[in-house]
Image (cartoon, coloured by chain):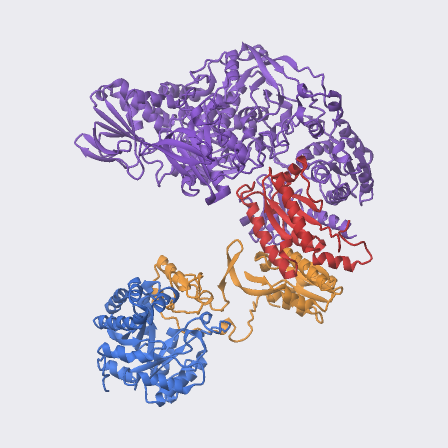
Chain colours: A blue, B purple, C orange, D red
Amino acid sequence: MRTESRLEKVLAAGHLAVTSECGPPRGALPDKVREKGKYLEGIVDAINVTDNQTAMVRMSSLAASVILKQEGLNPLFQMVTRDRNRLAMQADIIGAYSLGIDTMLCLSGDHTKFGDHPMAMNVHDIDSIQLIQMVKGMRDEGKFQGGAEIKNPPRMFIGAAANPFADPFELRVLRLAKKIAAGADFIQTQCIFNVDKFEKWMEQVCARGLHKKCYILAGVTPIKSLGAARYMKTKVPGMDVPQEIVDRMASVPKEKQAEEGVTICVETIERLKKVEGVAGFHIMAIDWEEKVKEIVERAGLLPRPQI
Amino acid sequence: MQNKQQQQSDKVLVIGGGMGGIRTALDLAEAEKKVILVDKAYAIGGLMTQLDRTFPTNNCDLCTLSPGLSEGSRQEYIELLTMTSVKDVKGKKGNFTVSLETAPRYINLDKCTACGECHKKFPECVRFTPGLDHRAPTCMRYPQATPQAFSIDLAKCTDVEALMKSCPAGAINPDDMGRKREVTCGSIVFSPGGALFDPSYLDYLGYAAQADVVTSLEYERILSASGPTMGQLVRPSNGKKPKRVAWIQCIGSRGLQKGAGKHCSSACCMFALKEAIVTKERFQDDIETTIFYMDMRTMGKDYELYYLRAKNEFGVRFVRSRPHSILRENGAENLTLTYSSEESGANQTEEFDMVVLSTGFRVADDVKELAGKLGLELNAGSFPKTDAFNPVATSVPGIYVAGVIQAPKDIPETMVQASAAACMAGNDLGVVEKVEHEKELLPLETGVVGEEPRVGVFICDCGENIGAVVDAAALAEFAKTLPHVALAELKGHGCSRESMQQIQQAIKDEKLNRVVIGGCSPRTHEVKFQEVIRKAGLNKYLVEIANIRDQATWVHANNPAKATEKAKDLVRMAVGSVVRSQPLADHSLPMNKNVLVVGGGVTGMTTALQLADQGLKVYLAEKSAQLGGVAVKIRKTLEKGDVQAFVKDLVARTEAHANIQVIPRALIVDHSGMPGMFKTGMQTGKQMFYRQIEHGVTILATGAKPNRPAQYLLGESAAVSTQLDLQNFLEEQPEAVKSWDNVVMIQCVGSRTADNPNCSRICCQTAVKNALRIRELNPDARIFVLYRDMRTYGFQEEYYQKARELGVIFTRYSLDNPPRVEATGDMVDVTFTDLILGRTLTVSADHLCLSTGMVADEDSNNELAMIFKLPRTADGYFLEDHVKLRPVDLQVPGFFVAGTAHAPKLISESVAQALAVASRARTMLAKDSINLGARAARVDKNSCAACLICVRSCPFAIPFINADGYSEIDPAKCHGCGMCASACPAKAIQLMQFEDDRILAKLEELFERNFA
Amino acid sequence: MITAERKPLEELIEYIKPFKRLLLVGCNECVTVCAAGGRKEVGLLASGLHMAMLKSGTNIEIHEHTLERQCDPEYIDELVPMIDSVDAVMSMACGCGVQEIARRFKGKPVFPAVNTKFMGASERQGVWSERCQGCGDCLLGKTGGVCPIARCAKQLMNGPCGGSTGGHCEIGEDVDCAWALIWERLKELGQEDRFVEITPAKDWRPGGGAGPRKIIREDLAE
Amino acid sequence: MENFEPVIVAFCCHYCAYTAADMAGSQRLAYPANVKIIRVPCSSKVDALHLVKAFEKGADGVYVAGCLEGDCHFKNGNMRAARLVESVQKYLEEIGIERERLEMVMMSAGMGYRFAQVATEMTEKIRKLGPSSIHVALVGRESTLQPAGII
């Protein structure tokens, strides 16, 4: 065991892990964080806390993670390379660890163009792979990137993201391999709607033995409405929503669409369980945390194992 | 020999001043041969004057061509006799005597300035000058008729005295008696053009009775901006805009109506398409256009694309049918068209607001009579018979035909034949006395650089034209007050010989070094005044014209005060500009008179022989080991001309000619230089030795390839061949043909398809030719020709009709349902749908023959296009400079194309082009140097930032960054548009004659007055 | 080449309002090539400023002059005879030129007329794109000749992010994904293995991270 | 500025609009004398500087007249000129001059009537817009001089 992370323990024990996420509020509203956390209590093994998601300013990922921790939950501290340089990042990492946070996800982050501060500088002092490398170096070698020794190094369980659906497809597995080589312990993927394509990707992942070097959590999302399905299909870069999903959403009356979305999500999980190399699920129910329980339950993933 | 030549006349008589006659005359004049151009009308232009725009360029071609007649030195070679007819012809080739009779014009051409006063005061007795009279059918985008003069109809004049007084120039001469004269000429080009079929007597077409039934030519007039309705498309019956317009093809053609010619008129399909497109362009979805036709004959270069555009882009509707009648029910507003369509066979009716009859060509009665006087043998349609391999040579040596009189045709082919006739006619002349150029007498140019400008301003009053609106004397006084003006004078008629001499004198006396003329447009008079000042010892570019007539007094006559102020502005601007003018040298190049002909087929050899006979050195580069090209595989023409004998003779003459050097196995590898001094490198012979040739012009006669697409079992079954194979087979194994029961021919194989959208032009007549031959060999064989449109244009139509009469079965198929073939032993089963019977038939054919047409030789054309930097069409043929007017001139000066390298065509058509390029090349090679004018871009290397913006802007890719690191523009290649100059961010480029400081000076002067 | 774009007239007018006589200086190098500050643009701007000032009731006198290169002091000397007859200078060169003029003429206000944009190449007539950020430690040799620093919106050095779609960047369809380009090139070169290597975090010091940069050629420097 | 008479400069391509202007002359089609023609070999020869300088000197209106689409003697000069006019219009707006004062028009050599029509319409349009602000400023500045543009 590299870390104290509950997520690591669940995975190491061979259980299918379940994570979900919690977007911090756009205001100093600690109760909002607690409220969202409550929905997930006992349902998931770790709660991703996003870091200025879609380049919109929110309560810092670190602060929200700490609030969840205080509630006895297991936050998964997300960090993007967009907003701060390596000094600030390393400072936050040891800060987080000091407050009991032991699991993190390393990302480059959406471009500021998409957010509410398009005028802001995109820092990108280092990229996400270099961030993974840096966190690993801090943990395993006990050194800052500048070379100085860290007293009580942060023992972080290091996560990274992978998008099997972005282009160029042939680079997707190679890039995953790079992330693993850089030190990623686990991977959370982009939401999967096109399971066929995901399976192809996983075949390649397994062929390279990458699933043995790292835990791969398949990302899923319940679609709220036909409009949401269409939006994700056409507007979100790197998202692959097959037409049949849109058609299926369109085939039910408006008031039943949310239910249909949940059903699709559950069916997807069922299908993904059979895919070799899938070590768990990451359920991204954006502003719909209350549905996570139903999904996890229907997918037969409850109760969560006691570690 | 010497004596004999001296007896020959040195002139060519050209009868007919239409597009063809003008082209012939210009070609001869440019080649420094004397021409008498006669036309019975009072201004030249022929039928073209009545057309709106022409396909596919959609502009007026006459305007581009006719001004050439009055240009500089060409005038010295052309004697233009309008209102003149040919009364009699005697003598023979080399020495004809022709009696001419000129009708009285009652106007002295030397004095008339085309001011229009007489017309204004006596409209009834003055014949219009084209363009000035909207009633009259004419084209006058260009306010310069040739000759630019009026003509009086004295019979209608009641007060001759008053009429005479109306002319400020005193040009009206009521005592004009007309004139009879005899001229001698060495050869005659007969190009009287065609007349149009008159459908008045065909009651069922309703033309005579219904105002809304018009001929195509009348429709052109209605569309034309200068037409009777000022370009408004309205129904003649009620002046309303039509909603539905129909065209009916083949009126007066293909023997369809009583009195119609048996021939196809060749051009009508295209002009109907053009009219429908122009109509659609104007009104888009608001108007329906329908063309009723039998076969769409768009066999010209890229014409099929035009047809497809009409159909697919413009939504013109096409109905394959035979119309029966056009009626208007009593009281009805619309016309009812009854027709039988191909599919149903039954009669159908449809209503239209307007119906356009596409009337074809015929030979006018007076032309037929004149042809008789010339002694020409005529065919059944009264068209002169011509040589099987030389379409411009008639039965009388020394008399040539060009244009519609040879056979119905459109403008590009007319232009080709006109040049070809010029070539042939020029050959028959004796030694041409070189017209003495005045250039040698010109005084040295006075140096003006660094001198203080001394401007002479000469204001013309142009009679009433300027003088009646502004006080010209006061204007001259005003000019005196302008800076740098040393002299300002009023001139009566500035362009009269007398005034010009006075101006020259004043330049010398007053030591003027810049001149401003206040008068009419520089477009028409700049060259004239440039000559004037040059003769007075000034560089010709030191003159500027203030256009105070066309652009002031003529348009502001209603407000003399403002006209005066504007005239002052214009003079002031001209003075401001001229003081900044600098002497410029015309760019010219010495002419290398050798010719490189690429391609040793019929076309290349014909051209080479024509040029070599005129004493020019010709290099004939052929990529294969032998001369002859594709023609060596062809036996007979449709008219049974013996191709083999013809080619053999050409090869023998070419190889024996002292002035022709044949270079076999020649592969062109590099090329440089400019027109008049090209260098082309090639690898030759088996060893591929490199050699370089220096030459003045390049003629591409590289031919095309017989197409052999792998379709319909071609190459798989022995019973399947191409038409080219078949015609050989018919000659080699006639016995085998006798055992055939069924023969099927499929047209348009590999042509008119998505891959190769154009028509191969030759296949329909080839199919008819071979079908007729099979019929001769085996009268019992059943012959099926599966076609899409039979395109037997011109006189080929008669052979097509003959084949039908002889029982050859012509069945149409459509592109979406092509015939299917299956090999069964030695035979081929051909299955096709008979659209008229509506049944699917299968014929077990002894022989299946595919009309595979021609394709461009992609590899070699691509290579040559890259080496010579020549543009090509999408299907790989060389693209001419102007598809109508300059069909054999390429866009790069000094390059010409002929034969099937231009587009698919028949041998006789290739010969015509071969002769035409010889003529075009001679026009260029007649000169010892090429004058390129002075309007070229000039780079200031010190300012140039080598940014490449000019390189990228130039539409002709002339500028380049040279080894010294700045932009270089070759003045000999520059076209003078000035795009680079305006785009240059460093202001390092100036266009000579239009320099920025001169343009800004005009602005400065204009506002100086307004604000000072 | 350094690219630039003229500033909005409004901003320039604010600068010159207090002055009666202005010297407008162009540069015949980069800004001419990118059509931002050559002789022609100087003329256009002079006219525009003159007119705009006229409208507000001031008849400003504008002298136009274009130097061979504004970033070299010797060329700037050409302005010496003119400088006393003007109240202010406006430069159409890149920021280097503006600063050189300011350095040379103490006490004379100097304003920039253009916004200096980036080091780029001209894609075609009238279109320039960023190609280099002067990071001081060129890695093009490892990235197939396509720079991820200048051309990836996130300066990713280890491959494309999840927003790369159909060869373009997530920020817009008119922006190529640098990593898609790099990958194409690596494949063409048979250097796919280069992609597998992890590029470590970059040392930004040569790119200005250590403050304003300087190059000293010892053999040339005096 | 009562009875305001605008001064309008027309840059005319030799091959089309200039010929059309001559054509209007030979057909005696009247149009306002306010339009002054400057001949250019192609509408693309017109430089942004020429257009801007015309306004700087006090023009109330300027137009560039080129050949109809597809008819340019130099392939595409007319379309380039149209693009240039569009960009100069934007610049004029920055300066504070109405973009309507500058226009691109296209015609063929035969369109004498169109030339006259364009000249008339342009003059009417500018007359309605009134004198350009530069024109006004120039007059105001040189107050001792005759009022500008009023002939």
Q: Is residue B782 left or right of residue D101?
A: left
Residue A172: which quarter of the image? bottom left
State whether residue D3 is above or below residue B85: below
Judging depth in this view, the residue of B412 and C115 nearest the camera is B412
**Residue nearest the observer in this picture, B471 or B484:** B471
Q: Position of residue B640 (x, y in %)?
A: 35, 18
Residue B483 at least partly seen? yes
- Which quarter of the image is occupied by the N terminus of chain B? top right
Q: Nearest the camera: C165 or B213? A: B213
On the image, which quarter does residue B298 sit in?
Answer: top left
Question: Horizontal placement of C47 versus B315: left or right?
Answer: right
Q: Nearer the viewer, residue A143 or B364?
A: B364
Q: How far across and how far down the image is residue B993, in percent?
A: 67, 42
- In this picture, is A295 found above or below D127? below
Residue B606 in the image: above or below residue B509: above
* In this view, B880 is above or below A284: above
Residue B852, percent from left and from top: 32, 32
Q: Residue furthest front?
A: B331
* View extreme (left): residue: B825
Residue B608 visible: no
Number of marks present in the image shown: 0
Q: Is residue A205 left or right of residue C109?
A: left
Measuring from the top left, give residue A248's x and y in whole percent: 28, 65
Q: Is residue A299 left or right of residue D104?
A: left
